[in-house]
Amino acid sequence: MRWYYSMYGHVEKLAEEIRKGAASVEGVEAKLWQVPETLPEEALSKMSAPPKSESPIITPNELTEADGFVFGFPTRFGMMAAQFKAFLDATGGLWRTQSLAGKPAGIFYSTGSQGGGQETTALTAITQLVHHGMVFVPIGYTFGAGMFEMEKVKGGSPYGAGTFAGDGSRQPTELELAQAFHQGKYIATITKKLKGSTA
């Protein structure tokens, strides 16, 4: 399953590719969920945010139904957006019972610029996984030559897939979408192996 928050659609596009990559692994069911919006409609309108997608809104207790996760969010000042943090803050009951412990989890993100926090967002998000006892699954350099692309601007890092939104007009590139597909397939394969070893 893939959970995300996307204001302008960049993270949503990566999420869809991650879902496709996960679904390409035999026996894996991949779903997209979005976390609740916390901003009022008036604020979203002033920010020219497009309407939200049709992906269902998740509640914290629904996290227990998944065998693995890939969490996605835009960056705000080098950290995950407040909407996603608010959702994770509501998982205290799951933390208390360690209901998510041992489940694999990855992350992906979008930033406004190259210096906008691609790695700091990942690093600060990992703390959420750690407190829940989840197993962080970075992609490392498993994406191969795409990780070393130097001729084109490319988001993402060994922590997870990523894109640069710029002023909002830049959309994820083919290479960034391919990295997202790879991340979905990679974490789904690991999740399947871990689930199989405990069956």
Image (tube, grey):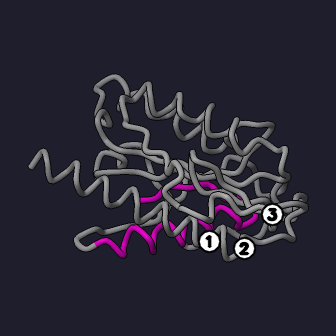
Tell me which amino acid carries mark 2: Thr
Q: CA distance from mark 2 to mark 1?
A: 6 Å
Neighbor class of circle 2 (other Cα within 10 Å; few <14, some 14-19, many 20+) is some
**Mark 2–mark 3 distance (CA, rounded to whole Å):** 9 Å
Q: Is residue 30 left or right of residue 146?
A: left
Tell me which amino acid carries mark 3. Val
Q: Are marks 2 and 1 in contact (CB under 8 Å)?
A: yes
Residue wearing tag 2: 173
User: Which residue is under mark 3?
Assistant: 153
Q: Quadrant of the N terminus?
A: bottom left
Q: Is residue 3 left or right of residue 5?
A: left
**Amino acid type of disc 1?**
Leu
In the rendered image, residue 9 lying in the magenta stretch gets the answer yes
Vertical side of 88 occupied by 62: above or below? below
Side of 105 relative to 147 (left or right): left
**Which badge, 3 or 1, is on the more N-terminal residue?**
3
Q: Which residues are magenta?
A: 1-25
| Callout 3: SS | loop
